[in-house]
Image: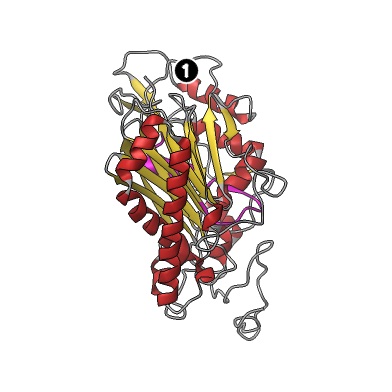
Amino acid sequence: MNAYDNQLPAGRVPEPGPEHAPSRKEDPIDLAASVYEYGWEGPAAPAAPSVVSGPVVPDGFLPRPIGPGPSAVRGPSSTDGPGAVGPAAPVIAYASAVASATSASVGPGPESGPVVRPASFREPGPLHHVGRKAPAYPAEPTDIPALSAGDLFGALLPDTVVDGGRFGPVTVRAASVRGDGHRYAAECRQDAVLVVRTGELLLVAVADGVGSQSHSHHGSHGILRKLTGQVARKEETLLAFLRTGAEPDFASMMSRLIGAAADELAEEARKEGRPPKAYSTTLRALLVPADPTVPFRGFVSVGDGGLLRLREGGWQDLEAAEADRGGGPISTRTDCLPEAYEHARARLITDSRPGDVLVLCTDGLALPLLKEPELQGFLGERWGSEVPGLAEFLWQTQVRVRSYDDDRSVVCLWEATP
């Protein structure tokens, strides 16, 4: 029950909300579900493949060419042909149908010949969902968070952030999206995502503000800012540890840097007149050297979330073998910064291969990705075959799964192929 309950206009009955939805202030606009599923004109007829001429991007070290967005085009692949399927085809049934439709439209030819829009992006309109039933929430944002209790920072946070680029041996894509539950309740995004270069190191990270705390969005964005400052001061030392594979030294230093960043975040909360617990957030980060001859990647985490790897069409949970986390890969009981900095876990990833995709994410994506084979297939087919453009990556990241309505933040790193 909140302050907005029972304040409907005379003669109006409350509209039903999605399952498990938080309460929100009354929306004066009637929102028809069909608008969100099909747009104003109803279901659209399947679109025929569109063909344009000429190559998209020059050949390079990337697994596949990069497209400019959901309307991206790609050149014919050496794997295309009758019966060709993507690497994730064993995981999900419709992969074969998608590949067959694509291969039927793309035939062998010179490099300057026609190229075909990938089948998965012919209709980028309504967001895709996996599972038998579509989520009950609208597929697009509804209420816009308002300035509340003087929290200008929360009111100014965008619904969605997308980022990316190339750095040394990796290509990066990152996104942070406000969850369906927060959109419905007109609350701001509590997740944060980071892609930053400091010297010869790439730092990527995600943070998940704890929903039960009033200012956790300050914590999630603040810890990424504080961690960046700490890493920048020790960039040369951290780089040396990564070059030599000195895991104990790396883990010790990262634990100290996390502690220092947490202390700074707690002090920031106190200066604002709030208890440090109000800024509670989880954290996951990766450090990647620019030198392509260095195979090691540094990883540090506090609290829940996910670090997965997509290799040759199969998903690997790189945290499954760590200490007990409540009976499964993800636990509902989690450590949080700035208070639980002593529980930071840091190590090196020593077995990276060309073509691997490292996926760093908050539990808004980690939970469904670990539990839903259909989502594994959907993302595995796309991320395992090519590096998407920014708009494509955002569209893929937002694939919807019923009952998973939290904020969703993810950073993907595509390792270069020879």
For badge 1, the amino acid type reads Asp
On whether residue 135 falls in the magenta region, the answer is no
Q: Is residue 306 above or below residue 119?
A: below
Q: Is residue 6 above or below residue 92?
A: below
Residue 149 in sight from this viewpoint: yes
Q: How is the image coloured?
A: secondary structure
Q: Residues within 10 Å of mark 1 (few under 14, many from 20)?
A: some
**Which residue in the structure is indicated by mark 1?**
80
Residue 117 lies left or right of residue 401; in this view the side is left
Residue 197 lies left or right of residue 260; in this view the side is left
Residue at horizontal 57 percent and vertical 52 percent from the top: 364
Identify the residue at the far right of this view. 327
Percent x, y of residue 331: 66, 51
Looking at the rendering, the stretch of residues picked out in magenta corresponds to: 387-408
Percent x, y of residue 178: 50, 58
Residue at horizontal 62 percent and vertical 84 percent from the top: 7
Give 145 or 274, whichever is nearer the viewer.
274
Give 289 or 363, whichever is nearer the viewer.
289
Residue 397 in sight from this viewpoint: no
Residue 245 lies left or right of residue 183; in this view the side is left
Q: How many marks?
A: 1
Percent x, y of residue 229: 33, 55
Residue 57 figure quarter = top left
Residue at horizontal 55 percent and vertical 28 percent from the top: 98
- Disc 1 on helix, strand or loop? loop
- Tell me the quadrant of the picture where the N terminus can be found: bottom right
Identify the residue at the far bottom of this view. 10
- Tell me the quadrant of the picture where the C terminus can be found: top left
Percent x, y of residue 199: 27, 43
